[in-house]
Image (cartoon, rainbow, N blue to C red):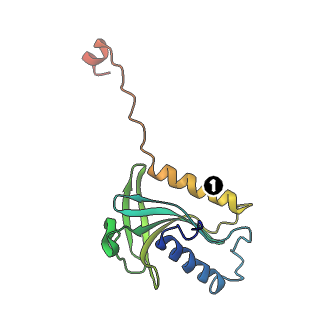
Amino acid sequence: MNAVESRPADELALEALFQGVHATRMRDLPLNNPQLRVEALGFRDWQGARVGALVTPWSVLLTILPGPGGADGGGVRRLSVGCTQVWRFPSGEYEFHGHEAEGLGHYQQCSLFSPALEFESHEAARIAALAALDALLAVPPPPEPRKVSRRGLLLGG
């Protein structure tokens, strides 16, 4: 089994969808970075959904796919075009836009870079996408306890 065959079907469908978009609607547009290609990466299960990143020649996006539960897996709501869902991650709350496509179903995305012209290589875009994904899911450290003297406690300081 090669690496492509071992990847989940939803990641392959996401890549195929955006490769098709690149070959048709986005082809030859000046906002495409010729150094970038379509790649879904870093997907992991998170609270019943699948969260990862998508690099395309025109953007880098965080992407949420329904989890194993299918249509409503992980609370990934089917949203009308233009509608959003706020997701709470360990690093904070983020707004994701709803999409739907034949062959993939519904999914949600949050733009990190659009257009993605600042990347000198595909590898640089991959590194940025994975770093953003790691930061999204990172649990912030607990706050340092404040030391208060007896005087401060009595005087409210």
- Residue furthest out toward the left: 154
- Residue furthest out toward the front: 1
Q: Quadrant of residue 54?
A: bottom right
Amino acid tagged 1: Ile
Disc 1 residue crowd, few under 14, some 14–19, many 20+, Cα 10 Å: few
The residue at 73%/61% (across/down) is 121
| Mark 1 secondary-structure assignment | helix
- The quarter of the image holding the N terminus is bottom right
- Residue 30, compared with residue 76, is above or below; it is below
Residue position marked by numbered label 1 in the rendering: 127
The residue at 33%/76% (across/down) is 71
The residue at 55%/71% (across/down) is 5
Residue 99, given in percent of the width and then of the height, sits at 44, 77
Residue 51, given in percent of the width and then of the height, sits at 45, 62
Between 154 and 39, the one nearer to me in the picture: 39
Q: Is residue 148 left or right of residue 133?
A: left
- Residue 81, compared with residue 124, is above or below; it is below
- The quarter of the image holding the C terminus is top left
Q: Quadrant of residue 35?
A: bottom right
Q: Quadrant of residue 156?
A: top left
- Residue 44, compared with residue 153, is above or below; it is below
Residue 59, given in percent of the width and then of the height, sits at 61, 69
Between 148 and 42, the one nearer to me in the picture: 42
